[in-house]
Image (cartoon, rainbow, N blue to C red):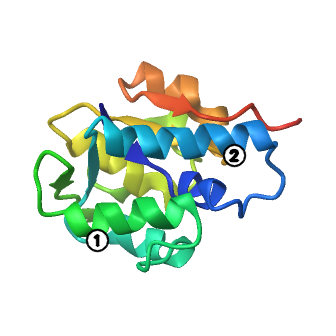
């Protein structure tokens, strides 16, 4: 399994997303556990932007939540190519990153989450992006699919 994991998945697994149902939180916990058990490869950026965001929502100590445990595992194993693929992404003044698609259909996507898309485009492993709670991923899922970027939703769609 090759994947990119939005930080909201770690937050949900740490039970920080209080608006989630217990079933949706469990889906995030199970997903992170499966990445570890199945020796999934997590794609990230060389510059550490994704790691920095993870550090804002998870503890290097690996506790008390499952998101923390996953973050510590990923941090400890980031040097292994089978566990962590790190790709170069380049900042761009208009799109956030050169690798981010220059397409009108995704031009209003959340600026902060563009790093995940840029990593997906730059990756040689064609990873899917996994989301838990961010409604933007739902709103733009079809547009990304048309651009060849797969977004997997772990939780129920947000209430409208």
**137 above or below 62?**
above
**Count of marks placed on residues:** 2
In the figure, residue 51 lies in which quadrant? bottom left
Q: Quadrant of the N terminus?
A: top left
Give the residue at mark 2.
Answer: 25
Q: Quadrant of the C terminus?
A: top right
SS label for mark 1: loop
SS label for mark 2: helix
Mark 2 or mark 1: name the one nearer the start of the chain.
2
Q: Position of residue 118 (x, y in %)?
A: 32, 49
**2 above or below 90?**
above
In the figure, residue 101 lies in which quadrant? top left
C-alpha span from label 2 to label 1: 26 Å
Q: Position of residue 103 (x, y in %)?
A: 43, 35
**92 above or below 52?**
above
Give the residue at mark 1.
Answer: 48
Give the residue at x 34% y 46%.
36
**As drawn, is 65 to the left or to the right of 69?**
right
Q: Position of residue 41 (x, y in %)?
A: 24, 42
Give the residue at x 50% y 67%.
68
Give the residue at x 21% y 62%.
77
**As drawn, is 65 to the left or to the right of 96?**
right
**As drawn, is 22 to the left or to the right of 131?**
right
Residue placed most toward the observer, 37 or 16: 37
In the rendering, which numbered label is found on residue 136? none
Residue placed most toward the observer, 76 or 115: 76
């Amino acid at each position: 399994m090759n994947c990119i994991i939005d930080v909201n998945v770690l937050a949900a697994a740490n039970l920080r997303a209080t608006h989630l149902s217990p079933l949706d939180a469990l889906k995030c916990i199970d997903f992170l556990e499966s990445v570890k058990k199945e020796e999934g490869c997590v794609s990230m950026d060389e510059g550490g932007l994704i790691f920095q965001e993870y550090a804002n929502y998870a503890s290097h100590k690996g506790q008390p939540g499952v998101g923390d445990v996953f973050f510590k595992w990923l941090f400890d194993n980031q040097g292994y190519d089978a566990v962590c693929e790190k790709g170069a992404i380049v900042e761009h003044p208009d799109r956030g990153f050169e690798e981010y698609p220059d397409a009108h259909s995704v031009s209003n996507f959340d600026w902060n989450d563009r790093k995940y898309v840029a990593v997906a485009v730059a990756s040689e492993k064609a990873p899917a992006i996994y989301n838990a709670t961010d409604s933007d991923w739902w709103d733009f899922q079809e547009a990304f699919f048309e651009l060849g970027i797969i977004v997997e939703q772990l939780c129920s769609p947000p209430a409208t």
